[in-house]
Image: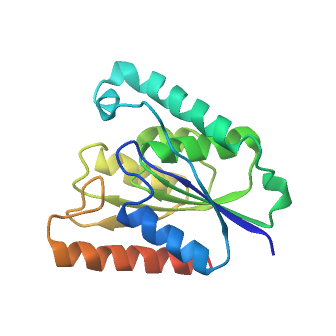
Amino acid sequence: MKRIAVFFPGIGYTVDKPLLYYSKKLMRERGYEIVDIGYKDISKDCLRDKSLMADTFAEVFAQTEEQLRDVDFASYEDVVFISKSVGTVAAAKYAADHVVRARHVFYTPLEQTFDYAGEGTEIVFFGDHDPWIVFERIKELCKSHDFRYTVIPDGNHSLETGRTFEDTDNIRKVIREVGEYLK
Protein backbone atom coordinates (compact mmCIF):
# COMPACT_ATOMS: atom_id res chain seq x y z
CA MET A 1 0.00 0.00 0.00
CA LYS A 2 1.36 3.43 -0.98
CA ARG A 3 1.13 5.83 1.97
CA ILE A 4 2.24 9.39 2.61
CA ALA A 5 2.38 11.60 5.70
CA VAL A 6 2.80 15.34 5.24
CA PHE A 7 4.01 17.46 8.16
CA PHE A 8 2.87 21.07 8.43
CA PRO A 9 4.78 22.80 11.26
CA GLY A 10 3.92 25.93 13.14
CA ILE A 11 5.93 29.08 12.60
CA GLY A 12 8.09 28.60 15.69
CA TYR A 13 7.39 24.91 16.16
CA THR A 14 9.46 23.03 13.60
CA VAL A 15 9.31 19.36 12.62
CA ASP A 16 12.23 18.72 14.97
CA LYS A 17 10.22 19.60 18.08
CA PRO A 18 8.67 16.78 20.15
CA LEU A 19 5.10 16.51 18.83
CA LEU A 20 6.13 16.47 15.19
CA TYR A 21 9.42 14.63 15.72
CA TYR A 22 7.76 11.65 17.40
CA SER A 23 4.79 11.72 15.05
CA LYS A 24 7.19 11.54 12.12
CA LYS A 25 9.11 8.72 13.76
CA LEU A 26 5.84 6.79 14.22
CA MET A 27 4.84 7.31 10.60
CA ARG A 28 8.27 6.22 9.35
CA GLU A 29 8.02 3.05 11.45
CA ARG A 30 4.68 2.35 9.77
CA GLY A 31 6.15 2.70 6.29
CA TYR A 32 4.84 6.10 5.28
CA GLU A 33 6.65 8.30 2.80
CA ILE A 34 7.42 11.55 4.66
CA VAL A 35 7.09 15.09 3.31
CA ASP A 36 8.07 18.04 5.50
CA ILE A 37 6.67 21.47 4.76
CA GLY A 38 8.88 24.38 5.83
CA TYR A 39 8.01 28.06 6.06
CA LYS A 40 10.58 30.76 5.29
CA ASP A 41 10.72 34.41 6.28
CA ILE A 42 7.63 34.41 8.47
CA SER A 43 7.97 36.10 11.85
CA LYS A 44 6.21 34.75 14.93
CA ASP A 45 5.21 38.32 15.73
CA CYS A 46 2.83 38.41 12.77
CA LEU A 47 0.38 36.20 14.67
CA ARG A 48 0.19 38.66 17.54
CA ASP A 49 -1.24 41.33 15.27
CA LYS A 50 -4.69 40.36 13.97
CA SER A 51 -4.36 42.79 11.07
CA LEU A 52 -1.39 40.76 9.79
CA MET A 53 -2.89 37.30 10.34
CA ALA A 54 -4.68 37.09 6.99
CA ASP A 55 -1.45 38.00 5.19
CA THR A 56 0.45 35.44 7.26
CA PHE A 57 -2.04 32.68 6.40
CA ALA A 58 -1.87 33.65 2.72
CA GLU A 59 1.94 33.46 2.73
CA VAL A 60 1.99 30.15 4.62
CA PHE A 61 -0.52 28.72 2.18
CA ALA A 62 1.40 30.00 -0.86
CA GLN A 63 4.55 28.30 0.45
CA THR A 64 2.56 25.11 1.11
CA GLU A 65 1.15 25.14 -2.43
CA GLU A 66 4.63 25.55 -3.88
CA GLN A 67 6.11 22.71 -1.84
CA LEU A 68 3.29 20.26 -2.61
CA ARG A 69 2.76 21.12 -6.29
CA ASP A 70 4.46 17.93 -7.54
CA VAL A 71 2.79 15.51 -5.11
CA ASP A 72 0.10 13.37 -6.73
CA PHE A 73 -2.06 12.62 -3.71
CA ALA A 74 -4.47 10.55 -5.83
CA SER A 75 -1.71 7.97 -6.30
CA TYR A 76 -1.66 7.20 -2.55
CA GLU A 77 -4.02 4.83 -0.81
CA ASP A 78 -3.52 6.53 2.55
CA VAL A 79 -2.81 10.23 3.08
CA VAL A 80 -2.19 11.68 6.54
CA PHE A 81 -1.68 15.38 7.25
CA ILE A 82 -0.06 16.06 10.63
CA SER A 83 -0.01 19.72 11.53
CA LYS A 84 0.72 22.20 14.28
CA SER A 85 -0.72 25.68 14.93
CA VAL A 86 -0.66 27.79 11.74
CA GLY A 87 0.18 24.58 9.89
CA THR A 88 -3.28 23.26 10.78
CA VAL A 89 -4.82 26.11 8.79
CA ALA A 90 -2.58 25.32 5.80
CA ALA A 91 -3.27 21.57 6.02
CA ALA A 92 -7.04 21.95 6.26
CA LYS A 93 -7.19 24.55 3.47
CA TYR A 94 -4.91 22.54 1.20
CA ALA A 95 -6.99 19.40 1.66
CA ALA A 96 -10.22 21.32 1.03
CA ASP A 97 -8.95 23.27 -1.99
CA HIS A 98 -7.38 20.22 -3.64
CA VAL A 99 -9.99 17.68 -2.51
CA VAL A 100 -7.35 15.52 -0.83
CA ARG A 101 -8.88 12.67 1.16
CA ALA A 102 -6.53 12.97 4.11
CA ARG A 103 -6.82 11.96 7.70
CA HIS A 104 -5.72 14.85 9.89
CA VAL A 105 -3.87 15.14 13.17
CA PHE A 106 -4.24 18.72 14.39
CA TYR A 107 -1.91 19.82 17.18
CA THR A 108 -3.02 23.09 18.80
CA PRO A 109 -5.20 24.27 15.90
CA LEU A 110 -6.11 27.89 15.44
CA GLU A 111 -9.76 28.84 15.12
CA GLN A 112 -9.30 29.56 11.39
CA THR A 113 -8.48 25.87 10.83
CA PHE A 114 -12.14 25.00 11.30
CA ASP A 115 -13.13 27.24 8.37
CA TYR A 116 -11.62 24.61 6.05
CA ALA A 117 -11.75 21.35 8.01
CA GLY A 118 -14.09 18.55 7.03
CA GLU A 119 -16.27 16.56 9.36
CA GLY A 120 -15.12 13.70 11.54
CA THR A 121 -11.81 12.76 9.87
CA GLU A 122 -9.64 14.58 12.35
CA ILE A 123 -8.12 14.07 15.75
CA VAL A 124 -7.26 17.22 17.68
CA PHE A 125 -4.98 17.96 20.63
CA PHE A 126 -4.92 21.26 22.48
CA GLY A 127 -4.19 22.62 25.93
CA ASP A 128 -6.49 24.48 28.26
CA HIS A 129 -3.80 27.11 28.92
CA ASP A 130 -2.96 27.91 25.31
CA PRO A 131 -2.67 31.71 24.94
CA TRP A 132 -3.24 31.54 21.15
CA ILE A 133 -6.76 30.15 21.36
CA VAL A 134 -10.05 30.66 23.13
CA PHE A 135 -10.24 27.28 24.81
CA GLU A 136 -14.04 26.92 24.97
CA ARG A 137 -14.37 28.02 21.33
CA ILE A 138 -11.94 25.35 20.09
CA LYS A 139 -13.73 22.73 22.17
CA GLU A 140 -17.07 23.84 20.73
CA LEU A 141 -15.69 23.73 17.16
CA CYS A 142 -14.32 20.22 17.71
CA LYS A 143 -17.73 19.06 18.90
CA SER A 144 -19.64 20.73 16.07
CA HIS A 145 -17.30 19.16 13.48
CA ASP A 146 -17.53 15.77 15.20
CA PHE A 147 -13.77 15.68 15.77
CA ARG A 148 -12.19 13.40 18.30
CA TYR A 149 -10.21 15.64 20.64
CA THR A 150 -7.99 15.52 23.69
CA VAL A 151 -7.37 18.38 26.08
CA ILE A 152 -4.01 18.53 27.83
CA PRO A 153 -4.62 19.97 31.32
CA ASP A 154 -2.43 23.05 31.90
CA GLY A 155 -1.06 22.60 28.36
CA ASN A 156 0.19 25.64 26.48
CA HIS A 157 0.54 26.13 22.71
CA SER A 158 3.23 23.40 22.67
CA LEU A 159 1.05 21.17 24.88
CA GLU A 160 3.62 21.68 27.63
CA THR A 161 2.89 22.39 31.28
CA GLY A 162 6.35 23.42 32.46
CA ARG A 163 6.66 20.20 34.47
CA THR A 164 9.21 17.98 32.74
CA PHE A 165 7.96 14.53 33.72
CA GLU A 166 4.34 15.47 33.11
CA ASP A 167 5.31 16.88 29.70
CA THR A 168 7.14 13.72 28.65
CA ASP A 169 4.22 11.60 29.87
CA ASN A 170 1.83 13.78 27.86
CA ILE A 171 3.92 13.45 24.69
CA ARG A 172 3.89 9.67 25.12
CA LYS A 173 0.11 9.63 25.61
CA VAL A 174 -0.47 11.90 22.62
CA ILE A 175 1.73 9.84 20.28
CA ARG A 176 0.11 6.63 21.50
CA GLU A 177 -3.34 8.10 20.83
CA VAL A 178 -2.24 9.24 17.36
CA GLY A 179 -0.95 5.72 16.71
CA GLU A 180 -4.29 4.20 17.71
CA TYR A 181 -6.22 6.70 15.59
CA LEU A 182 -4.08 6.00 12.52
CA LYS A 183 -4.26 2.16 12.71
Displayed quadrant of residue 149: bottom left
Residue 161 in percent (x, y) is at 19, 64
Tell me the quadrant of the picture where the N terminus can be found: bottom right
- Say left or right for 149 vs 135: right
The residue nearer to you, when weighing 86 against 153, is: 86
- Say left or right for 78 vs 177: right
Pick out the residue farthest to the left. 163
Q: Residue at x 62, y 61 (%)?
A: 121
The residue nearer to you, when weighing 91 against 60, is: 60
Pick out the residue farthest to the top. 51
Residue 76 in percent (x, y) is at 80, 63
Q: Residue at x 65, y 41 (%)?
A: 67
Q: Residue at x 74, y 40 (%)?
A: 69
Residue 74 in percent (x, y) is at 84, 55
- Residue 24, compared with residue 126, is above or below; it is below
Residue 94 in percent (x, y) is at 65, 42
- Residue 5, compared with residue 32, is above or below; it is above
- Say left or right for 20 vs 81: left
Tell me the quadrant of the picture where the C terminus can be found: bottom right
- Residue 16, compared with residue 134, is above or below; it is below
Pick out the residue farthest to the right. 75
Displayed quadrant of residue 80: bottom right
- Say left or right for 150 vs 37: left
Q: Residue at x 51, y 44 (%)?
A: 38
